[in-house]
Amino acid sequence: MSKKYEILLNFVKDLSSETPNAETYFFVKKNINNYIMNIDIKSKPIKDKIVEVDTKIIFKDKDNSEKKSHFELTYTSLVKIVSELKDKKELEKIFLCDVQNEVYPKIEKIFVNLLRESGFPEIKSGKKIDFEKLYNERSN
């Protein structure tokens, strides 16, 4: 079975690390375990069979403390659909699962690097994200 899509290119669209001051940095360093990662995936048709897929990762304080840092990455993939697909569900699965499984290792590497270079070298790669499971949970 041949692939139904081809990733034409990827790039970092937005990359942000915000820690307002040293006091906040020390507070966050001590409480980084309270931070959670959210992933948001959006797709937008560009032209015939070409779609822009944005994968946005936000790492933020789940307790929403007064002293907090904010980390965010938007990674864009330009995807060309190479087979005849009419079913919207099949397209959704390509953008939310297949493309993500292919690009996420690179996204994770960039994001962990951002955290390390922002003064949090103790942050390691997280557990593997099961995009298939997330997609199925979303569909039910």
Image (spheres, helix red, strand yellow):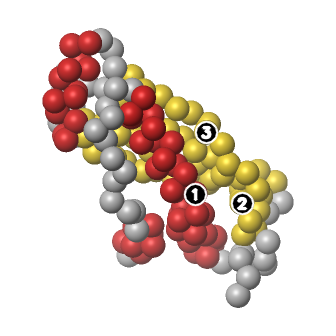
Q: Which residue is mark 1?
A: 103
Crowd tier of the residue under label 1, counting other residues whose Cα lies within 10 Å: few below 14, some 14–19, many 20 or above:
some
Verify CB contact (< 8 Å) between mark 2 and mark 1: yes
Picture quarter with the C terminus:
bottom left
Q: Is residue 81 visible?
A: yes
Label 1 secondary element: helix
Q: Image point 45% across, 38% down: which residue?
A: 113
Residue 79 is situated, as x and y percent measured from the top left of the image, at 71, 59
Q: Which residue is mark 3?
A: 12
Q: Is residue 138 visible?
A: no
Q: Which residue is mark 2?
A: 7
Q: Is 62 or 31 nearer to us in this picture? A: 31
**Is the residue 17 above or below the residue 33 in the image?**
above
- Residue at the front extreme of this rendering: 121
**How far apart, in angstroms, are the residues tagged by discs 1 and 3?**
12 Å
Q: Seen in the image, is 5 located left or right of residue 37?
A: right
**How far apart, in angstroms, are the residues tagged by discs 2 and 3?**
15 Å
**Is the residue 93 above or below the residue 29 in the image?**
below
Picture quarter with the N terminus:
bottom right
Q: Is 29 or 88 nearer to us in this picture? A: 29
Residue 40 is situated, as x and y percent measured from the top left of the image, at 46, 50
Crowd tier of the residue under label 2, counting other residues whose Cα lies within 10 Å: few below 14, some 14–19, many 20 or above:
some
* Amino acid on which disc 3 is placed: Val
**How far apart, in angstroms, are the residues tagged by discs 2 and 1?**
9 Å
Q: Image point 53% across, 65% down: which residue?
A: 101
Q: Seen in the image, is 36 located left or right of residue 33?
A: right
Q: Image point 22% across, 27% down: which residue?
A: 28
* Amino acid on which disc 2 is placed: Ile
Q: Image point 26% across, 12% down: which residue?
A: 22
